[in-house]
Amino acid sequence: MQNHSIDPKSLYRLPWNMADNGITWLEPTAQCNLNCYGCYRKNIKNSHKPFEDVKRELDYFQSVRKTDCISIAGGDPLLYPQIVELVADIKRRGLKPIINTNGIALTEDLLDELKKAGVFGFTFHIDSKQGKGRDPKWNDKNEVELNELRLYYAEMLASKGGIACSFNSTVFQDTIQYIPDLLEWAHKHIDIVHTMVFILFRYITPDTPYDFYAGDKKITFDDIHYHSNKSEVTDLMSTDAVNVIRERFPDFAPAAFLNGTKKADHFKWLLSERVGNKDEIFGYAGKKFLEYVMTLYHYKKDRYISYASPKTLSLGRTTLFNAWPFDKGIKAAFRNYLKYLAANPFRIFKKVNMQSIMIIQPVDLMPNGDQSMCDGCPDITYWKDKKGTEKLVWSCRLEELIQYGDFLRMIPKNKEEANTKKELTGVEADK
Ligand code: SF4
């Protein structure tokens, strides 16, 4: 496979930061009706937070951080008894409520209630390593076969109208090959599928070269929630996903990113925006388009956009006609669109849509034991420590705070071993 490197300077660095971000993460419950492999949270029965506490978390977010949307996650938030009231409360605060769910508990009636309450969108987590818990007909299906289930939810939302529809999946060494198939499927449904998210798997494995500490207390490897008992690949990079995608779609072009806190040229969130209709993808937006959208939205609303509405995303044709002078990517897409129209001018009546593709590369472990997180983490959530101090923390590592009251530190067992990671990360262990 060809190795396509990406120059970070060719992309727009998303302007998200701790105090001003597109997204903030809220967990009203840790209870779930699935046990997905790769999940960063313990599934705890009857762990619903009192509604007043959840509202307090929202108050805290709003006192310290500008945000465009609230990702309501968990656990599965559809199991939260006051989910409809919670969505209505978030909407009343002028924020966009997005529900991150596996979809199992979503019924037509609940969807109607959530729509009435003001839900902005759903992100359905569907992949082939979620274990049993869905209708048995979905057991042991591969990523491609699960597209039928994805379509079920996409059509369900589309039938109500005006609700953003995203899908995310955890990507493993043996499933990365399916990303192009999922993108092909998403293209086929570009009118009703608005975003595809691929989250690269991260766990700690038995061959870890690190010892783990909470304060001065050494933590045994198998006590840590995110550990795997088998040796497996846990350091897939966003560029690996791009390489796989470009095998099938050579023109695939990311436009924006978030870097790592320890590595400026790591693509922790790598965003592509493609423009097309069911016949063809005309092209990909470039960095100037993303900069223009972020800046304009912030100027108007005093916050950075995260999710766009289905109505906005259906304005692909308007975007092509108006934004081409400002952005090389849109200009190339516009050229392709004109060629497409030249072959048959009646095609102008076909809607053109925009669709987002995000690749997420969670925590990277540096050879010296540092942990590189997403710089400008959008999935920041709430934590109250033992002294009662409220804080914003990484949601992907909440389990460490719950178990040990602190984030774990990692110390290389021996420096030679730690340096074997040097090739991958380009960072040497401490001398
Ligand atoms: S740091 Fe963790 S919680 Fe934040 S965006 Fe990255 S993976 Fe998500």
Image: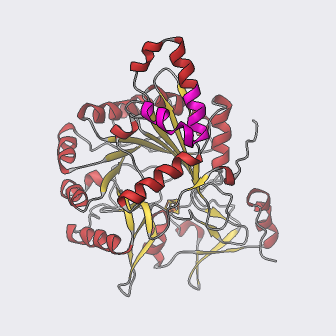
Q: Is residue 247 left or right of residue 225?
A: right
Which of the pair 200/255 is nearer the observer?
A: 255
Q: Quadrant of residue 242?
A: top right
Q: Is residue 40 above or below residue 103?
A: below
Q: Is residue 380 above or below residue 113?
A: below
Q: Residue, x 47% and y 56% (percent of image)?
A: 295
Q: Residue, x 37% and y 48% (percent of image)?
A: 34
Q: Is residue 309 left or right of residue 52?
A: right
Q: Is residue 334 a member of the stretch shown in magenta?
A: yes
Q: Position of residue 153 (x, y in %)?
A: 33, 35
Q: Position of residue 361 (x, y in %)?
A: 58, 54
Q: Is residue 330 a member of the stretch shown in magenta?
A: yes
Which of the pair 248/346 is nearer the observer?
A: 346
Can residue 140 be seen here? no
- Identify the image quadrant of the C terminus: bottom right
Which of the pair 407/19 is nearer the observer?
A: 19
Q: Is residue 367 above or below residue 430?
A: above
Which of the pair 357/47 is nearer the observer?
A: 357
Can residue 57 be seen here? yes
Q: Quadrant of residue 382?
A: bottom left
User: Would you say the magenta stretch is mainly helix, strand or loop?
Assistant: helix
In the rendered picture of this protein, how many numbered marks are placed on residues? 0
- Identify the image quadrant of the N terminus: top right
Q: Quadrant of residue 419?
A: bottom right
Q: Is residue 42 left or right of residue 174?
A: left
Q: Position of residue 201 (x, y in %)?
A: 57, 51
Q: Position of residue 192 (x, y in %)?
A: 37, 32
Q: Which residues are magenta?
A: 316-335
Q: Residue, x 59% and y 86% (percent of image)?
A: 216
